Image: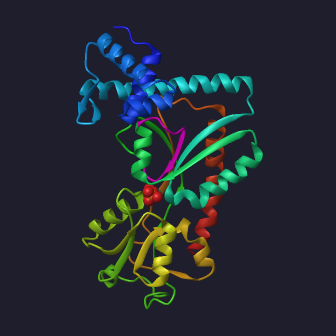
Amino acid sequence: MHISFRQIQIFQAVAQTENFTRAAELLHMTQPAISMQVKQLEDNVGLSLFERQGKRIVMTAAGKAMHAYGCELLAQYQGMVETLKELKNVHQGYIKVSAATTSIYFITRMLASFSKMHEGITVSLDITNRKALVEQLQHYEADLVVMGEPPSNLDLHSQRLMCNPLVLIAPADHPLAGKKEIPIADIAGEKFVVREPGSGTRAAIERFFAEYGHTFSSTLEMSSNESIKYSVIAGLGLGIVSLHSIKLELETRSLAVLDVQGFPIQRYWHIVTRDGKWLSPAAQAFKEYVIAEAAAYAQDYQQLLL
Ligand code: PGA
């Protein structure tokens, strides 16, 4: 069975786009050339890799198996190219970082100070929710991922960075603001403004209420912590957000943290790499920088709860 590396690259482009024309555009080839290469690959393998469903093409079981290996092979190839490039010039590099929506409150600051020290290194930062981060890890897409809980079903290396306490927030003039040790039953009737399904924060909130035998009713679901904070200030309901997202609002006293039984919900930030994904010297330097900085940030945030 002969499979060339070029055929794997072409197959991966078709698998990712599920469209011969778009794959051709991506690879700067013609659509017939792509179709011919895929046909030849299928002949070599002796299996169909795609099937037509109306106007769409979808991967067969053999196509899906090849795609999973293809992701890993291309990641290794990319690693090899980056290493060779960096051996030419160790002061340059490109790092692909993906981070949980809620981590922007610290990761952007870390990135700014790192970039000042390493001007030749370009960092691409993708901010997205937990569900999307897990998919990226699955497909070896990011060099480094900053997230809450790492998924347990993938081969990863993860290192804990710092605490990520989730606090219950209310408008500053809420009747429970300033009260101590509020029983959880006292907030059972309140409406909540919460993150979207797929968010790590949302999953933690659901686990928390299930543990206490309560359910929560939400007025609104939002994919941004900023929108949640503004909605809580406007009186749409209570919110549960990372302490890291409300530093400014606590300083300006526009929000109150309620001292409710079981809160803060204790969580942690991690920096995660996928096993088998090569880490460039630039990515390694950024990882070490984030780990070293996290300790100082943790202390800074802890002051907010005092
Ligand atoms: P989120 O992730 O921004 O998807 O909620 C943060 C987390 O997992 O704590």
> Vertical placement of 46 versus 229: above or below?
above
Most foreground residue, 293 or 68: 68
Q: Position of residue 15 (x, y in %)?
A: 37, 31
Identify the main secondary structure in magenta: loop
Q: Position of residue 218 (x, y in %)?
A: 32, 74
> Vertical placement of 287 versus 45: above or below?
below
The magenta segment is 139-149
Examine the image and state in which quarter residue 143 appears: top right
| View quadrant of ligand 1 | bottom left
Q: Is residue 279 left or right of residue 109?
A: left
Q: How many marks?
A: 0
Image quadrant in which the C terminus is located? bottom right
> Vertical placement of 1 versus 189: above or below?
above
Image quadrant in which the N terminus is located? top left
Indicate how the structure is coloured in the image.
Answer: rainbow
Q: Is residue 286 left or right of residue 197?
A: right
User: What residue is shown at x 35% (from left), y 15% (from top)?
Assistant: 41
Examine the image and state in which quarter residue 85 appears: top right
Q: Position of residue 181 (x, y in %)?
A: 42, 82
Q: Is residue 47 left or right of residue 85?
A: left
Most foreground residue, 28 or 246: 28
**Is residue 140 within the magenta segment?**
yes
Examine the image and state in which quarter residue 219 appears: bottom left
Judge whether residue 258 can be spotted in this image: no
**Is residue 191 within the magenta segment?**
no
Most foreground residue, 306 or 12: 12
Q: Position of residue 39 (x, y in %)?
A: 33, 17
Judge whether residue 171 can be spotted in this image: yes
